Amino acid sequence: MLLLGTTAAYAQKARPVRYVNHTEFGGLFGRVKYPNPYNNNAEQVDSKTSLTVQTFNGVQIHEKLSAGVTLGIDWYKTALLNPIAGGVRYDFVTSKNVKLFGTVDAGYAFAWFQDDSEGAATKGGLMVNPGVGMKVGRPGVAAFTIALTYKRQEAHITKVPLWDQRERFEDRVYNRLALRLGISF
């Protein structure tokens, strides 16, 4: 009888699994320093802006904590990368209609949709994306989100060798500030 009472009490306290989605789009902003082969390899610095889209799909583990998988597409000037990452979302501060949350995604990017010229190849690499954001909306319904994150993305680019080279490649690290808008439910 005691076992039945304990089981019934546990069943009443168990929460149903809640699906969580954050779908966002925005920009990746950064400064790039690289050698200019047309100016005796003198370093040149340029500002770069790229487009990013991602969706986080997971389950709510705790009232404030969600864990899941993040899928995305990042359009850099010469690389189209598709990160797949494990991610968490944590609500730091909550009020009636506004929540301040933290986000961390870590994974690997692939170059599935990249179209390289003949003799060239683009491969993705490790990716990490921590940040903070804000959700605005009533609890239990869709909310508007804005997030500010730091994105570090690695890539390996094999290029067509020049006349005096056997191989030519670049190991790139994209360090970007990401500003994204989206919805969450």
Image: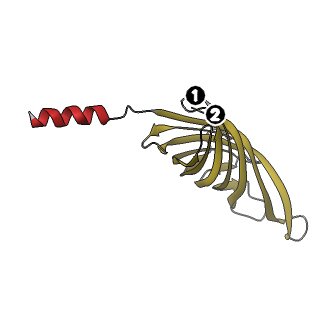
Does dot 2 land on a helix, a strand or a loop? loop
The answer to whether the residues at label 2 and label 1 have Cβ atoms under 8 Å apart is yes
In this view of the protein, which residue sits in the foreground, 144 or 105?
144
Residue 141: give its label. Answer: 1
In this view of the protein, which residue sits in the foreground, 122 or 96?
96
Residue type, label 1: Val
Q: Position of residue 1 (x, y in %)?
A: 8, 33
Q: Residue furthest top?
A: 141
Q: Residue furthest front?
A: 96
Residue type, label 2: Gly
Residue 137: give its label. Answer: 2
Query: In which quadrant is the C terminus drawn?
Result: top right
In this image, 17 relative to 31: left or right?
left
Residue at figure coordinates x 42%, y 42% from the top left: 61
Is residue 79 shown above or below 36?
above
In this image, 127 relative to 46: left or right?
left
**Can you tell which quarter of the image residue 6 is in?**
top left
Q: Position of residue 105 (x, y in %)?
A: 55, 50
Residue at figure coordinates x 54%, y 30% from the top left: 140
Is residue 115 in view from this perspective? no
Q: Position of residue 39 (x, y in %)?
A: 91, 68
Residue 86: give its label. Answer: none
Is residue 43 in view from this perspective? yes
